[in-house]
Amino acid sequence: MRYALLCCFIIAGLSSLPCTAKERSTIIAGNFSASNSNAALPEDWQPLEFKDIETHTVYRLVNDNGIFVVQAESHASSSGLTRKLTVNPLEHPLLSWSWKIANVYEKGDISKKQGDDYPARIYITFAYDRDKVGFWERVKFNTIKLFYGEYPPINAINYIWASKAPPELITPNPFTDRVKMIVLQSGDEKKNQWISETRNIAEDYRKAFGEEPPMISGIAIMTDSDNTGESATAWYGNIVFSRGTDAP
């Protein structure tokens, strides 16, 4: 996905959710199961759309065996659901969620721009830190701040369900090396099954970028197929940040 996605977390102007470890042991970023059938979108989450992509993925709350989850349907489309929040990954390093897919893409390819589509992904952005960029990049970040009032995220991690790539692969996004892709699931052998995931974001950031992580600035879920032109359906369960000893 394009670098513009990083900026959209700021441009969208969503409400922030600051929290420190002293305040609570877990941070529920996506409390989808507490929703009801009258809600079009989960509380505190907003659509993330791109001006150059006319067809958007459709997200809605659905009842899956008695539990409300987010369903995403993509038909040669791209958009996401996003929430701007502030989380210290050193205090709440664990990210837990569940997801399910109906299919993967025949033309999905993590190494190529035309294959940069995933039936399911969790997007984590990290706050700008001027000490971690060079002079010219600092100029670019300052220019964006001048136009939009806030700095865009400095880096991002994508946890993805790939079409065909080895699990645990960490690789740059084909559009920008400021986004690192981490393959958790691959292929369709587990399609139509709920899969629970827990990742240590701090450890993954160190492996991906070779440095300590800055503050988390936002989270998104995304099912996209604009590059491959194919279709997919995915479902997302609750998303929770927790301390190292309190993983749900």
Image (cartoon, rainbow, N blue to C red):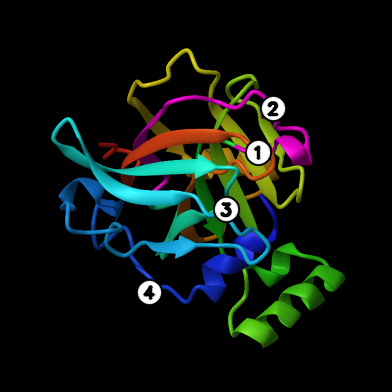
Q: Which mark is in front, 1 or 2?
A: 1
Counting every numbered tag in the picture gives 4
Residue ID for mark 2: 107
Q: Amino acid at mark 3?
A: Pro
Front residue of 232/139: it is: 232
Q: Which residue is mark 4?
A: 15
Viewer-side label of 4, 3: 4
Mark 1 vs 2: CB contact within 8 A: yes
User: Of the residues under marks 2 and 4, which one precedes in the sequence?
Assistant: 4
Q: Which quadrant of the rendered structure holds the C terminus?
A: top left
Image position of 230 with respect to 68: above or below: above
Q: Is residue 15 left or right of residue 2?
A: left
Q: Nearer the viewer, mark 1 or mark 3?
A: 1
Instruction: Select label 1 or label 4 by which is in front.
Output: 1
Q: Residue drawn 57% across and 54% down? A: 55
Place of residue 18 in the rendered image (x, y in percent of width and height, measured from the top left): 36, 68
Residue at the outermost right position: 136
Determine whether the residue tagged by mark 4 lies in a helix, strand or loop.
loop
Front position in the image: 136 or 47: 47
Separation (CA) of disc 1 from disc 4? 33 Å
Chain part drawn in magenta: 92-117
Residue 56, magenta (yes or no)? no
User: Mark 3 — residue?
Assistant: 213
Label 1 secondary element: loop
Image point (29%, 54%), residue name = 27
Q: Which residue is mark 1?
A: 229
For label 2, the crowd category at 10 Å Cα-Cα, with few meaning under 14, some 14 to 19 and many 20 or more, is: some
Q: Residue 213: x and y, percent? A: 57, 53
Of labels 1 and 3, earlier in sequence is 3
Q: Nearer the viewer, mark 3 or mark 2?
A: 2
